[in-house]
Image: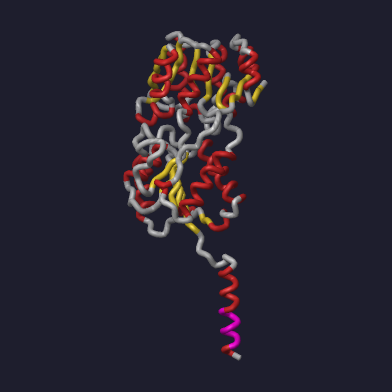
């Protein structure tokens, strides 16, 4: 009788595990410099895609391996990066943003796969050799080629501005988040002038003072960067956008739809993150199946969609060409 019970137990365990119920889940660690809505939307998108592809139940995102130290906490960020890289049971680390990726690569153990998301300029930051070559076996990143150059080109094509204003804290990350290099490169080919304004911090007061200085310098257009003062979830961005509109300054929002809806003149559409989520989910699945991160395709190419605010156009006295409106994917009133 005892032997029969033991036999039946092993049969049960065999069938249970054969159907995948006792498979150990893949552990994915997560590191971001601080909370940012783009990161939140991206995380939600690839998790939704993993769910659709039947993979979400095979993955665990442990809370004790997920860190967001908060902006301007570089020492803590590096401490968490070092901690993650010391773990031996992690299947993958996802780093969100330039700062987190830089910290992880500083303590890279050369074994744990790293997938970077939300990085402004992976090539310019030295994370990868080129758009087609990682250069680090256990590292990969999602890249949108020439995304920011296209932003400046389309903005100039539509508005025809002469002086484009840019504000940024005088740091490596600050320049990346306002796309200073891409703006200068595009200005040389299209013939508009870049007016720069450095700010001390990314709080709303310093950003507003920066806008006032740019206005005094005669800008007729402004590129809304990914600085914390323009974070819709943390600050009253309406004061900054209202200042631009009250002074007839055309604006292009780097982070797209939500800012256009809030009053910016135009930007690339960012309401739908599903395609980004699918691309990242495929990368995650390939890595968990054993593929080297460096062997993955990094370029996520696709035609940008345009968001445009008709009310803002009227407020600043800009009459958009009909062909621009016809090519616009999102119109806000």
Q: Position of residue 75 (x, y in %)?
A: 34, 42
Is residue 96 in sight in this rendering? no
Is residue 144 in sight in this rendering? yes
Q: Residue at x 46, y 24 (%)?
A: 149
Q: Residue at x 44, y 36 (%)?
A: 119
Q: Image quadrant for the C terminus?
A: top right
Query: What colouring does the structure picture have?
Result: secondary structure
Quarter of the figure with residue 120: top left
Q: Residue at x 36, y 40 (%)?
A: 102
User: Is residue 131 rendered to the left or right of residue 285?
Assistant: left
Q: Tell me where the magenta segment starts and ends, as one range.
A: 4-10
Q: Position of residue 153 (x, y in %)?
A: 49, 19
Q: Main secondary structure of the magenta part?
A: helix
Residue nearer the viewer, 228 or 268: 268
Q: Residue at x 44, y 38 (%)?
A: 97
Q: Is residue 7 above or below residue 194?
A: below
In the image, is residue 7 part of the stretch drawn in magenta?
yes
């Amino acid at each position: 009788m005892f032997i029969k019970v033991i036999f039946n137990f092993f049969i049960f365990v065999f069938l249970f595990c054969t159907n995948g119920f006792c498979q150990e889940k893949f552990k994915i660690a997560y590191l971001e410099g601080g909370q940012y809505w783009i990161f939140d939307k991206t995380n939600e998108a690839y998790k939704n895609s993993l769910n659709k592809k039947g993979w979400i139940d095979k993955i665990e995102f442990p809370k004790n391996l997920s860190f967001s130290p908060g902006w301007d906490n570089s020492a803590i960020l590096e401490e968490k990066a070092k901690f993650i890289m010391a773990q031996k049971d992690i299947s993958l680390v996802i780093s969100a943003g330039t700062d987190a990726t830089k910290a992880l690569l500083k303590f890279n153990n050369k074994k744990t796969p790293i997938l970077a998301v939300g990085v402004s300029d992976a090539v310019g930051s030295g994370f990868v050799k080129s758009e087609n070559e990682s250069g680090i076996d256990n590292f990969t990143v999602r890249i949108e080629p020439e995304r920011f150059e296209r932003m400046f080109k389309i903005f100039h094509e539509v508005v025809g501005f002469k002086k484009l204003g840019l504000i940024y804290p005088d740091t490596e990350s600050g320049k990346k988040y306002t796309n200073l290099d891409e703006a200068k490169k595009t200005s040389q080919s299209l013939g508009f002038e870049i007016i720069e304004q450095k700010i001390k911090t990314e709080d709303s007061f310093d950003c507003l003072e920066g806008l006032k200085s740019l206005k005094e310098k005669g800008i007729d257009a402004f590129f809304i960067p990914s600085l914390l003062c323009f974070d819709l979830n943390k600050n009253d961005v309406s004061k900054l956008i209202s200042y631009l509109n009250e002074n007839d300054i055309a604006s292009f929002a780097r982070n797209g739809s939500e800012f256009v809806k809030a009053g910016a003149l135009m930007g690339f559409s960012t309401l739908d993150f599903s395609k980004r989520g699918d691309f990242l989910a495929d990368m995650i699945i390939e890595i968990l199946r054993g593929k080297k991160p460096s062997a993955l395709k990094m370029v996520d190419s696709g035609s940008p969609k345009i968001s445009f605010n008709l009310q803002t156009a009227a407020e600043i006295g800009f009459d958009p060409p009909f062909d621009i409106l016809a090519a616009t994917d999102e119109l806000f009133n």
